[in-house]
């Protein structure tokens, strides 16, 4: 199964509360943090919520 590599590239300051909580749920705490998650629908939904704060790469 494919994996998503999610990197935080923008600060969570002055974003909506649900977006900040979504970053924390993904495991991202500060700019430059990288996490790898399985390519599942609920992770895709979380990434879409904070797409303006992160970059996403598909890794095999």
Image (cartoon, grey):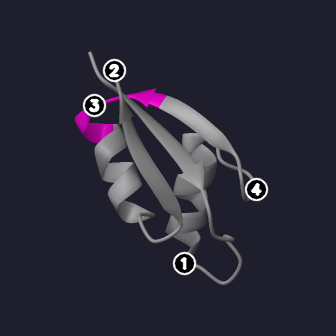
**Residue at image location 30% in from the left, 30% down from the top:** 39
As measured in the structure, the alpha-carbon distance from the residue carrying label 1 to the one carrying label 3 is 24 Å
Q: How many marks?
A: 4
**Figure check: 15 above or below 18:** below
Front of the two marks 1 and 3: 3
Q: Which residue is mark 3?
A: 40
SS of the residue under disc 2: loop
Residue 27 lies left or right of residue 55; in this view the side is right
- Quadrant (top left/top right/bottom left/bottom right) for the C terminus: top left
Q: Which residue is mark 4?
A: 30
Vertical placement of residue 55 versus 37, above or below: below
Which badge, 1 or 3, is on the more N-terminal residue?
1
Going from N to C along the chain, the mark reached first, 2 or 4, is 4
Please name which of the two marks, 1 or 4, marks the residue nearer to the observer: 4
Front position among marks 2 and 1:
2
For numbered disc 4, what is the local secondary structure? loop
Residue where numbered disc 1 is placed: 16
Q: Could you tell me how far apart the alpha carbons at marks 1 and 4 are, in whole angstroms?
A: 16 Å
């Amino acid at each position: 199964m494919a994996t998503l590599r999610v990197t935080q590239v923008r600060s969570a300051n002055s974003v909506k509360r649900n977006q900040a909580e979504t970053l924390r749920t993904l495991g991202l705490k500060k700019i430059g943090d990288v996490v790898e998650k399985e390519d599942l629908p609920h992770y895709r939904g979380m990434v879409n919520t904070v797409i303006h704060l992160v970059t996403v790469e598909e890794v095999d």
